Amino acid sequence: GAVVSQHPSRVICKSGTSVKIECRSLDFQATTMFWYRQFPKQSLMLMATSNEGSKATYEQGVEKDKFLINHASLTLSTLTVTSAHPEDSSFYICSASEGGDRVETQYFGPGTRLLVL
Amino acid sequence: GENVEQHPSTLSVQEGDSAVIKCTYSDSASNYFPWYKQELGKRPQLIIDIRSNVGEKKDQRIAVTLNKTAKHFSLHITETQPEDSAVYFCAASLNDYKLSFGAGTTVTVRA
């Protein structure tokens, strides 16, 4: 149980284009999903908290107009990197909580490696 | 916000020996402390977690201890095996369920 998928796993795009990343909870409903960014050999940095049916909450320093988050259903959250630039190249990982007695526990997706040329 | 510090940043152990990773946190209100294992290019995998009402938890070769007074918690891996080689992250969470991660420890188990 508690499986989280992410698509695509890898994407290469030109500077200025937008990229959409999907995060799905496959076998549970996730009221809350989280989006992280991880640079090589570094820790996971929380970008935003995604709540189903409401606006995402962004961490300090994260531009909400650049990183658009939509949590359309209890099993799907999307992150759109708008007008991507080379400095946006990174490993983006989502996580989801199955709630209930394990509400704090986050299960991670496999990540999306973004390379902006 | 919560600040989590993790030490050491790298750890090399002989197969069969024990490995210990230590983390400290800043916010005494934090009440959930998970540990994740991440292999290169893959997702973080939850290996063990502990809540603030518990001082110690064990799962086979892995154990975690929590000292709320000192605000630190540790991961202990006994009888290490080559497949334990990975990056390990500690994290702390408040009631808002947002995780603050430590910087990570790269563990290498020498055969």
Image: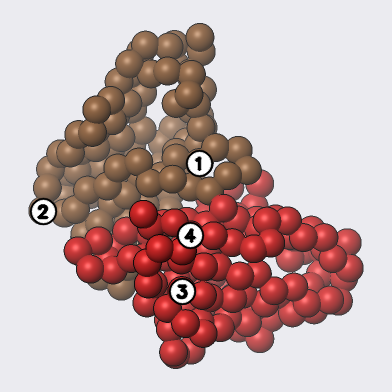
As measured in the structure, the alpha-carbon distance from the residue carrying label 3 to the one carrying label 2 is 31 Å
Q: Mark 3 lies on which chain?
A: A
Name the kind of residue labelled 1 in the image: Gln
Q: In which quarter of the image is the C terminus of chain A?
A: bottom right
Q: Earlier in the sequence, mark 4 or mark 3?
A: 4
Q: Mark 1 lies on which chain?
A: B
Front-most of residues A53 and B8:
A53
Evaluate whether label 2 is on the same chain as label 1. yes
* Secondary structure state at the residue bearing disc 3: loop
Is residue B3 visible in the rendered image? The answer is no
Which secondary structure, mark 4? strand
Q: Which mark is residue A75?
A: 3
Residue A90 lies, with reference to residue A30, above or below; the image says above
Mark 1, Cα crowd under 10 Å, few <14 / some 14-19 / many 20+, is some
Same chain, marks 4 and 3? Answer: yes
Within the image, what quadrant is residue A7 found in? bottom right
Q: Name the residue under label 4.
A: A4
Q: Chain B is drawn in which colour?
A: brown
The label shown at residue B53 is 2
Looking at the image, is mark 3 or mark 2 nearer the viewer? 3
Give percent across and percent down for residue A78.
Answer: 59, 76
Marks 4 and 2 share the same chain: no
In this view of the protein, can residue A26 be seen by the observer? yes
Cα separation, mark 4 vs mark 1, equals 15 Å
Amino acid type indicated by mark 2: Asn
Q: Which chain is red?
A: A
Residue that numbered label 1 is attached to: B38
